[in-house]
Structure formats: C-alpha cells, structure tokens
C-alpha cells in the first residue's frame, strides 16, 4: 500500500499544481500557501478526533521540536518557494525541476542517517540535472524570460531541498508514532510559522488586500484540499508504509503527470526537449534509487 499511496500522491499533487498555477495568477505565492496551510490545519482537527480520539499523543519534547521544525522547513518555506517557481516559469518546467526531490532525499539520508551513495547513483544525479537543464533551456525564450527561468529554477530546487530535509527529519517519528498527529503538527507548525512571519513583518494589511480582492476561490479551495490535505496525507502514508528511497522515486512520477496536465489543461507547450528531459530525469532517478 505504501507504493500505491506514493503514486496516488503524485497524481493528486500534479492536479493541485495545475490548479495552483491558475489561482497563482491573481493570488501571490505566500498568501496562497498561507491559505492552503491554514485550511488544511483546520481540517486536521476533526480528522484527528475521528481517527485517534481525544487522547493526547505521547510525543517526547524532542519529537515535538522535530515535527515543528519539519513543518516550518518543509511546508512554510518549501511550499512558498515552490509556488513562487510555479508562477515564474510555469507548471511543466517546475514539475521537472522538482525531480531533484528524490536525489535530495538520498543526499539528506546520507547526511542524517549515514547511508552510502554508490558511483552509479552519482551518475544518476548528473542525469537528473541534465534533464532539468534540457527541459528549462530554450534557444528562443519568448514565453518566459531568462531571468524568470533562472529565478524559477533556483526557487524550485531550493523548495524540494527543504521538502527533502523536512521528510528525512520526521521519517523516524512517522514509523513509530500516530500518523494523523504527526501530519497535523507539521501542518499547524507550518501555518503558525507563516502567521508569525506576517505578524512580525506587519504584513496583515497587504495579505488582507489580496484575500479581499476578487479571487477564483472555488479553484483555490479545491487546489488547497488536493495539495495540502489529501496529497500530504497520501505522501506521508507512502513514507510510513514503505522505504524512503522507494517512496521518493514513486513521487517523481508527479513530473510526468504535471507536464501532461499542463499540456492538456493549461495549453503549455509539449516538445521533444521536455519529453527527452523527462526521460533523463526518470533515468537518473532510477539509477539512484532502483538499482
């Protein structure tokens, strides 16, 4: 079931990305991420009560801290940067840049868990980078400026690095503690961190201006439910029920789903470079985590 949840998460997240791309045309990345995290946090309260009851979880002080940091890094920061990349360079390019996630998970596992990266996995990492360069480079960049692509790649790569750090941090807790509480604490920490940032920077007025202006709220709410509630539940379930390396490579199928959905629904261009880039990224991911 872990493998099933990981692929289902990829498809769910890809659809959410397409909807976020639409809603991000009018609502900035930070406000969009803040809304989806607050909504998901509120929904987690009845979900936890329904699944685990009213009992208080037996987390240690260190586990509370790790979950909170995981939420701040992997949700508040990472998702904001991801949505920023999405607005800068489109869904297809962002989806392929996000293929760095699986290599980052492995690199973080080496650092935190003492795992060893073999020589062909280094080669796989190079293939992933080559695929990203191929899908984001264009001889004629009329649709997106060179500066937007560079910024988008930087934000996209940094966001999946933060996601990788967040999931590697919380993996041991997922395996031994309440799944719903772990998910809820991460979401609440991410939302609380963003609200604290707004308070400290006195950005309430700016955010309220965006929230009060006309927005495609039906699309935003649906994208938030898919991208921050359902897909995160599937994502964490995959990591709980299978090995991190397996879950991460199956999550990479989101890149293919995103490029396909972007072509179908957003009318983004599909050309041989993007097809070849996807092929290279999946080949690299396969070398890193399958063999």
Image (spheres, grey):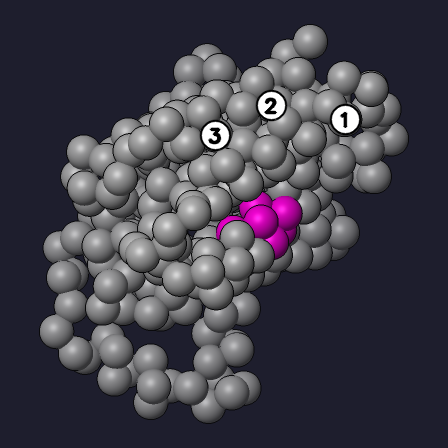
Q: Residue at x 25, y 78 (%)?
A: 210
Crowd around label 3: few <14 · some 14–19 · many ≥20 (10 Å): many
120 falls in the magenta region: no
Q: Position of residue 42 (x, y in %)?
A: 34, 56
- The number of numbered discs placed on residues in the rendered structure image is 3
Q: Residue at x 37, y 54 (%)?
A: 141
Name of the residue lying farthest toward the top: 291
3D distance between C-alphas at marks 2 and 3: 12 Å
Q: Write down the residue under mark 2.
A: 285
Corner quadrant of residue 248: top right
Left or right of 232 in this view: 262: left
Q: Position of residue 74 (x, y in %)?
A: 57, 51
Of the 4 image quadrants, the one containing the C terminus is: top right
User: Which secondary structure, mark 1?
Assistant: helix
Q: Which mark is residue 90?
A: none
Looking at the rendering, the stretch of residues picked out in magenta corresponds to: 156-162
First of labels 2, 3 by sequence position: 3
User: Which secondary structure, mark 3?
Assistant: helix
Left or right of 37 in this view: 21: left
Q: Which mark is residue 277?
A: 3
User: Which secondary structure, mark 2?
Assistant: helix
Main SS of the magenta segment? helix
Q: Residue at x 33, y 80 (%)?
A: 207
Q: Position of residue 139 (x, y in %)?
A: 43, 47
């Amino acid at each position: 079931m872990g493998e099933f949840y990981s692929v289902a998460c990829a498809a769910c997240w890809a659809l959410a990305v397409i909807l976020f791309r639409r809603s991000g045309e009018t609502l900035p990345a930070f406000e969009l991420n803040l809304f989806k995290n607050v909504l998901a946090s509120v929904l987690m309260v009845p979900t936890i009560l329904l699944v685990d009851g009213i009992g208080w979880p037996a987390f240690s002080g260190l586990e509370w801290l790790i979950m909170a940091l995981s939420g701040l890094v992997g949700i508040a920061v990472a998702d904001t940067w991801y949505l920023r990349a999405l607005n800068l360079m489109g869904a297809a390019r962002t989806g392929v840049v996000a293929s760095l996630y699986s290599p980052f998970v492995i690199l973080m596992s080496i650092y935190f868990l003492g795992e060893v990266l073999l020589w062909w996995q280094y080669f796989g990492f190079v293939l992933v980078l080559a695929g990203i360069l191929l899908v984001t480079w264009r001889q004629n960049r009329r649709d997106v400026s060179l500066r937007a692509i560079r910024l988008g790649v930087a934000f996209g790569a940094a966001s999946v690095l933060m996601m990788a750090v967040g999931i590697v941090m919380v993996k041991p807790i997922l395996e031994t503690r309440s799944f719903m509480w772990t998910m809820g604490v991460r979401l609440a920490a991410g939302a609380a961190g963003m609200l604290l940032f707004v308070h400290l920077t006195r950005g309430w007025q700016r955010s309220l201006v965006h929230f009060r202006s006309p927005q495609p709220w039906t699309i935003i709410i649906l994208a938030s439910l898919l991208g921050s509630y359902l897909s995160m539940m599937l994502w964490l379930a995959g990591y709980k029920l299978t090995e991190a390396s397996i879950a991460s490579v199956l999550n990479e199928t989101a890149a293919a789903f995103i490029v396909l959905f972007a072509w179908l629904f957003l009318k983004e261009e599909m050309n041989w470079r993007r097809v070849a880039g996807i092929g290279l990224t999946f080949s690299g991911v396969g070398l890193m985590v399958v063999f």
